[in-house]
Image (cartoon, grey):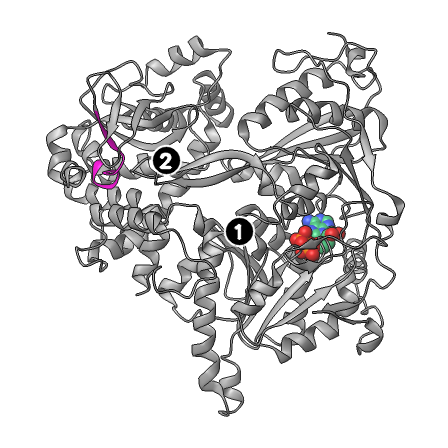
Amino acid sequence: MCAKSLRLFHESRKPPSHRGRSFKRPRPTWVEVSDDESRGRRRHPKVNGVSTSMPNGVHKPSKKPNGFVNGTTVVHMEDSADVAVPRVPVATSSKHAAIQEQRANLPIARGKEALLNEFREHDVTVLLGETGSGKTTQVPQYLLESGMAGDGMIAVTQPRRVAATSLSARVATEQNSSLGSVVGYAVRFDERSSPATRIKYLTDGMIFRELMSDPLLSKYSIIIVDEAHERSLRTDLLIANLKTIQQQRNEPAKGKGKEKEKEKLKIIIMSATLDAEKFGKFFPGSKIIYVQGRQHPVTIYHCAQSQVDYVDSALRTFFQIHTDQPPGDVLIFLPGQEDIESLEKSIRLYANQLPHGQQEVLICTMYASQAPGQNAKVFHSTPPNTRKCILATNIAETSITIPGVKYVIDTGKCKEKRYLAKNTGGGFDTLMTRDITKSSAMQRAGRAGREGPGFCFRLYTEDSFKNMATSAEPEILRCGLTSPMLQLKCLGQSLETLDLMDRPDIDSMISALKTLYLIGALDSTGEITEIGRDMAAFPLEPVYSRAVLASKEYGCTNEVLTVISVLSASSKVFVESSEQRDAVAEARRKFKHASGDHLTILNVVRAYNDVALSENKSGRREWCRKHFLNERALLEAIDIREQLQHTCERLGIDWKVSCGEKEDPVIQSLGHGLVSNTAFLQPDGSYKQTMGHSAVKIHPSSTLCDKKVPTIVYDEVVYTNQIYARGVSIINKSFLAGLGSLKVRQA
Ligand SMILES: Nc1ncnc2c1ncn2[C@@H]1O[C@H](COP(=O)(O)OP(=O)(O)OP(=O)(O)O)[C@@H](O)[C@H]1O
């Protein structure tokens, strides 16, 4: 294949092959929506019952971009006291001055005072504003500058860590301060804050965890729940708690003077695509405000025909942009890591064949299981004469601004976590590819047009867009509940009685209760046990924290911490390569432990630690490359381990205690936690779950995949065309019986 064939958009040329297949279809034909739509004359689509001004077409700022829509009433800026654009503070440098000017030009800036008045008057405000209007970066700063937070802090919650870290960095820059001083962040296994921190961006999981030590969240005077439309499980639990906390903190203050006033809690719920009425009903007396207008237009194109293979179409569209369109980075939304890696390979292949003089292509990837440091690379500035191409899952869909992105390619697909309980008996989370919702499509388009006019190419037809569900089903209705259930129990709450916006399925609740009972976190009356409380102290899934606690009895905390740290890292330690399968197997043989994958992991970490003593950075990197190991995952595991050591110290567990080369203590400790993830061999060679009715196969990546052993323990189940157990070790059958899982099955 020669570089010329990259002009795949001319149907007369032979199209490039992708994933071993030839392109048979013509390039996507784009349909730009009519000019009427672009001017907003067409009725704006309703998202969750709320009229929005982000049509599925060219978007231009409305004639009155500064207005607020409150319910059906439009409050124009002329009605507000703050008609003029706010004054830009005196700049200390030209860069800072430019940033302040950019801030002042955001649509939200013109409504600053009107907004602050609404916040002042209402305990709960639901703020809807278009993507890029300035909600996430500006509202916390306005609140801080207005003094409304008093001596308390302002929390801004995000469903994803990448948003929390990148936004805090941006707002710290806007505040002309270093990250961790006035503006900080907290995400799992990583925090930058100090006593001076006044605005803290944190994941919804982190603030939920804070409830354990501070049930009234008393250090915060304002809590902003951002991207609430995602309805993540933790967001829903947080919102339920905030409602009660606010009642407790605000009601006694009535008539008690200014001292009490300071302790009041304000809640602000924000999103661009939100069912505002539902939130409004959940918080009686709340005010719904709509910030109209966006800074830069986004032109949206839909495919004229449905595309059969979205990865092929994304490839074609990328090169169509790259060869025909002016400079600007491209962000491509794909459902998962597999598609990202596949497309990355194809783009690399054809980019290398581009004619001389064409811009270089720099590919960056972004997905949840990739190490945070690697994800952060998308924010680095693009070198000259280069077009950055970012391949991302929906972790890049909300909140973030990736500087330089002008074009978005939206495949219209995502992966959704879903708990399979009814069909399988045992119950486990699965990731399934499905069509996105209207809300997601609008958020994705909103990643373009943040620094200037943008373009969004949707690899689906306009009819498909119209037929999409409005928004995703709340996570609480479709995910495993073990960890949130334990945290709630610690707070003396329960899912059954909590005032939730939506109540989860009874099967999922029973399954979570069963697991917590089996690992000893709950007693037979459903009350939390002492060991359950200790489990909740770790920033880990309860099944993993149970293993750490069990290791104390077995004298192997040192080893178990290592294994659990690797299992908790955001990416896998073993690099898979289908093309070099034999080389991978050969390199890995030296780490292989006869008992299975957990002790194999331990061998890898031990070997890496030995290498680290004798080799410099590049020597270590080379060693990892040679052994098909992901060094970033190993380094992340080292960080995680350090944090777990701190938790051990707080709980009085000596983490240095080691069992040396013995394997049983380690596996049995893991067995205490993973007791629901055990299976026994059937006469036909498959394994049957002890806590369910499903047959599982050992995953091909396991060191035990060719073995038949009586009983296994595994980290997780992966559901593809069949159910696989991944991360598998041999476990003693009588040990399992002693734990009671077999009895539970029989019961
Ligand atoms: N890291 C950044 N680099 C450059 N500009 C940025 C950055 N972060 C934000 N901005 C600018 O600030 C604008 C407002 O961003 P902000 O995140 O506050 O918007 P938003 O209304 O919360 O959008 P969304 O609903 O998409 O989260 C962006 O459109 C962009 O112009």
x and y percentages locating residue 718 in the rendered image:
39, 30
Residue 23 location, x and y as percent?
A: 70, 14
Q: Is mark 2 within 8 Å of ligand 1?
A: no
SS type, badge 2: helix
Give the class, few, some or many, for how many residues have Cα within 10 Å of label 1's Cα (few <14, many ≥20).
many
Check if residue 677 falls in the magenta segment: yes
Q: Earlier in the sequence, mark 2 or mark 1?
A: 1
Left or right, residue 152 beside residue 307: left
> Looking at mark 1, is its residue's CB closer than 8 Å to ligand 1?
no
Q: Residue at x 81, y 16 (%)?
A: 7
Q: Nearer the viewer, residue 700 or 548?
A: 700
Q: Say whether residue 118 is left or right of residue 187.
A: right
The magenta span reads: 671-680
Q: Nearer the viewer, residue 732 or 651?
A: 732
Q: Which mark is residue 567?
A: 2
Residue, disc 1: 159
- Residue 575 in percent (x, y) is at 46, 22
Q: Quadrant of residue 593?
A: top left
